[in-house]
Image: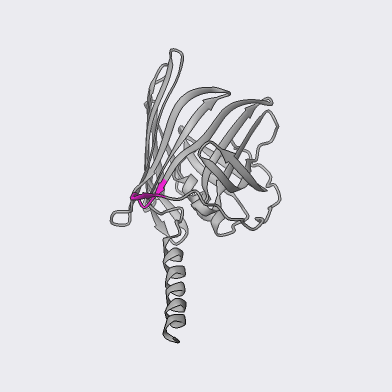
Amino acid sequence: MRTIPTLLVSLTALTHSVFAMAAPTPLTPQTAEYQVNYGDIELGKAKYHLPAAEDGIYKYRFDSDLSLLLLTDVRHVLSEFSQEGNQLLPMRYLHDRQGVGPTFTEQTAFAKEQGFIHTRYKDEKGKYPFEGDIFDPLMVQLQFRLDISTGKEVLDYKMIKSNELDEYKFRVIGKERMTIESGSYDTVKIEVVRDNNKRQTFFWMAPDLAYLPVRLTHFEKGSKQLDIKLLSYHFDETHAVPAVQTEVEEPTQPKAPKLLGTGAN
């Protein structure tokens, strides 16, 4: 009879170990698809895809196909980066935009050993020093998820975008239950810090999904312009992660950092 309790204890410990190993991280191979709306008008869908690293190199992709009446906007973005601990190191960034309006290609090469960043945007070239922590506009999302998952309080990021050096700052507002069409999630609500209230951007990230964003809303002068909501998600590229959420601890709310001269866009 003693064997049964012993087996139960062993099985419980093994089960807990398996679930612990199976918990996704921001760098777990994943796919997430979103519905993009302009106000209440459906524009189309966007998809993020992060396969497993090959030879220490990650290749993160973003693809979107949006349209409104006769207007179209199709984008394909690729970010290549490596990892040192919890720090992501950018290597190459490609952004191709087609549709009604300006068609362009943006390319960025991060030559850390040379100490420079080489850019090309709409046939215009640029060159910047590779100093400190710097990111491209796509992989910075993963760095943000890594940082907030480890409790980092200073959420301040510099990136090269459109041949310019941009700075984005964020602050944690608090936890909030978010219910959308794809499910109900316990989330952490984040706000983009800006120097005025003409534009406001909020997004909600689910800790149980490795801080995957489940919703983003953007306001211009108090009117909702963009509403992006999670449709589906997969981790490990083999099965969908069940939409089972648990309560999360209240995150530490850092003081709103002061904006530097570049500002956030």
Residue 171 position within the rendered picture, expressed as x and y whole percent measured from the top left:
65, 46
Residue 239 within the segment the image draws in magenta: yes
Name which quarter of the figure residue 203 lies in.
top right
Identity of the residue furthest to the front in this view: 1
Image position of 61 (left or right of 162): left
Query: Which residue is located at x 58 percent, y 24 percent?
Result: 39
Is 228 on the left-hand or right-hand side of 194? left
Identified at 61% across, 56% down, the residue is 248
Residue 140 image offset from top left, x and y in percent = 48, 46
Residue 42 among those drawn in magenta: no
Q: Is residue 263 visible?
A: no
Residue 12, image x and y in percent? 46, 73
Q: Please say if 47 is above or below 83.
A: above
The residue positioned farthest toward the left in the image shown: 55
Q: Nearer the viewer, residue 121 or 105?
A: 105
The one nearer the camera, 145 or 7, is 7
Q: Which quarter shows the N terminus?
A: bottom left
Q: Residue furthest top?
A: 70
Q: Is residue 183 visible?
A: yes
Residue range in magenta is 234-240
